[in-house]
Structure formats: C-alpha cells, structure tokens
Amino acid sequence: MSIFRFARLAPLIVASGMAVLLASCGEDQKAAAPPPPVVTVAHPTRRTVIDMDEYVGRFVAVNSVEIRARVSGYLDEVHFTDGQMVKQGDLLFSIDKRPFQTSLDQARANLAQARANSAFAEADLARGAQLVRDKTITEQTFDQRTQAKRVADASVAAQEAATRQAALDLQFTELRAPVDGRIGDRRVSPGNLVTGGTGGNTTLLAMIVSLDPIRFEFTFDEASYLRYERLSKAGQDMTSRDGSALVSLRLIDEPDYSHPGRMDFLDNVIERSSGTIRGRAVFANPNGVFAPGMFGRLRVPGSPSYQALLVADAAIGTEQARKYLLVVDGENVVRQKYVTLGQVSDNLRVIKDGLAPEDRVIVNGLMRARPGQKVTPQEEGAPPPAPGAAQVMK
C-alpha cells in the first residue's frame, strides 16, 4: 500500500476505532447501573387501643394526724423509735400520771361524800313525809327537806361527772396512735413540760401519716374536664367519682406505668386563677414505696376503646412540623404520606389519620429510599433475597 493511500485511510480507521470504543463504554455504563435498593416493608398493625392522658401530681396521705396532748404535764417517757411504723392503739408518749391520779382520788372521795349526803337527805325526807301527815312538822319544813334531797342528788351527779373527767384526764396521760402509719421524729424529749388542751398553744409531739392506701392528687385543664364529662354522659366514664375508672402510675425513675390504681374523687370547682380542676386517685402501697409529697406521672383513660393502625416509631419521618411515612405502592415506587400521630402503645405509634390498612410502610432502609424512587420491597420477617435477585426483578 502506498504512503498516500494509507494517509487517506488513516482518519477513517481512527474514527471507526473511536466509535467502537464509545459503544463499548456505553454498554459498560449500562451494565454497571445499580439495581433498585432493597427496603423492608410491613403492613400497619391493627389493634384496639384507648387514648391515655398523662398528668403530673403528688402523693398525699389518706390520714395525717398531729399528736398533741390533751392535758398539760411533764413528759415522762417516749415509747417509739423515730420514723417507725405504728399500729392504731400503740402507746407513743406517757405524761407524768401522779397529779392526775391524785385528782381522780380526790374526785372519788368527793363523790362518796355526796352520795352519803344524798342517802341522809333521802332518809330525812322519808321521815318528814310521815311527820307532815301527823301534823308534827309544817309543810314548809317538809318542802325544805325535799329541796335538800334534790340538792344532794345534784351534788352526786356533779361529783360523778368530776370523777369521769378526772379518770379521762388520767387516761389522756397516755398518748396512743389514732391511725396506722409511719410516725415522724419526736419533737419533745422526756422531762419537758407539755402544754395540752384544745387551744392553739398546745405542744406538737409528733406526726403520723398513713401509707397504705395512699392518694395521688393532680390537676387537669378545663378542656379535658369537658371532654371527660361529655364522655361520661355518653356512657364512657373516664374519671368516675365512684371509683370505677382504672388508672396507672409510674415514678420518676421508672420507665413503665406499672402501678395500677383507680379514681376516687373529682372536685366540684374549677380553680379560677389557673383554670384547672383537682382530681384524685388511690393506690395500694403495701411495701411503703410511695411517700406523701413524692412526685409521679399518672395515666388516665382519655377516650373509649377504638380500632387503630400502628407502626414502628422508627418508620416515622419529620418534615418541619409535619410527620410522614414512606410507603411502597403497587409498582414498587416510594410514596410519601403525611400522617397524624397518636400515642405510643407497646413501642408502636398510633396513626390517627393519613394511613390505610393495606399500605406497605417502609420500616427499614429509609436512608436508601426517596419519594418517586423505585425500590425492591421485602416483607418484614422474610428471608433476605439471594445474590443477583435484585437484577432479575428489575
């Protein structure tokens, strides 16, 4: 071949080679295109649920009693250890009994004297009745004896009352627990003078609070109160005043509402300053874990039972203030659905609006899915696809 002919054919050879090379690159790029990503999908769970409202409140004792003396005297002895549990009737304090025992003995002696005077007046009146019939004494003298008998009887009644009061004062020198509960620390040591009585200057000796059962007080707003009342009128009593509404509670260090109780009181007045009303629940406290003044969180039924759709909380996305789910349609294309969320029930989130029972919700692989993108859905719990299966399904 001549040099001139090769020179004319060289451009054609180069062009043909470039065409072959470009075709080869296009086929490689087409073969290297990634398959649709694999995502895990699941249908919403259907379950009967009840909406629960949560409130913060404090425990209060059913019975809280201040131990104060009814009589004044010197404190003789303390019969308990600070902070111990006491039973109703247990002896707590003793006041010096000797002055009160003396007063009782004197009252009994005065009673015996009054009874003797009454017996003499009765005998004198009986003799006077015969004498007045015989005209030996005048009617005036007989009336005087009758009056003396009445005075003697009144004196007996007065001395009997004084004796009972003295015996009661002697009994009051022993201060006993009026209720079961835990007693606080003693405020007065033996040997100190205790001021008793019914006035405002009496000496506080100790305080007892009952623990089992125990009450939990909380407040809720006027809108919730109206909702509860309307449900009650419809036959769905959420916060019953007769103790039939069941509630649950958890402490500040507990993850679950594991303490069952019941509503036992709903106030009759809405507080004007705060627009709230006071409610109360009662709980069993056999182990004494709950203490008056302790904080807790309470769950109250806020709706009748209804059928709800639930999904895993991890499947829910956020777009500014709106919540959404990614679902896969019949053509395996990702669609975005905005939803209204409800409460959490057993680690699943209630979806109140925006989701259908037949929807396939993406629960795993959310980072690989975008709205409008085609994916390879795999049912939750199904075995993973074999290698190359994605290319076959394409």
Image: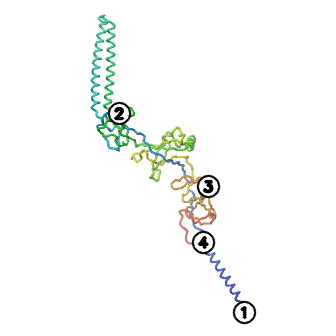
Tell which circle, 3 or 2, labels the residue nearer the N-terminal end: 2
Marks 4/2 in contact by CB < 8 Å: the verdict is no
- Mark 3 nearby-residue class (10 Å; few <14, some 14–19, many ≥20): few
Q: Which residue is mark 1?
A: 5
Q: Amino acid at mark 4?
A: Pro
* Mark in the foreground, 1 or 3: 1
Q: Nearer the viewer, mark 4 or mark 2?
A: 2
Quadrant of the rendering where the N terminus is positioned: bottom right
x then y, percent, for residue 253: 44, 52
Residue 178 horizontal/vertical position (percent): 37, 37
In the image, what residue occupies the spot 66% across and 80% down? Answer: 22
Query: Mark 2 highlights which residue?
Result: 196
**Helix, strand or loop for disc 1:** helix
In this rendering, position of residue 358 left or right of residue 140: right
Q: Amino acid at mark 2?
A: Gly
Earlier residue among tags 1 and 4: 1
Label 3 residue SS? loop
Q: CA distance from mark 1 to mark 4?
A: 47 Å
| Quadrant position of residue 154 | top left
Q: Check disc 4 and report the residue beneath it.
A: 34
- Secondary structure, mark 4, is loop
Q: Amino acid at mark 3?
A: Gly
Task: Pick whichever of labels 2 and 1 is earlier in the sequence.
Answer: 1
Q: CA distance from mark 4 to mark 2?
A: 92 Å
Residue 354 disc label: 3
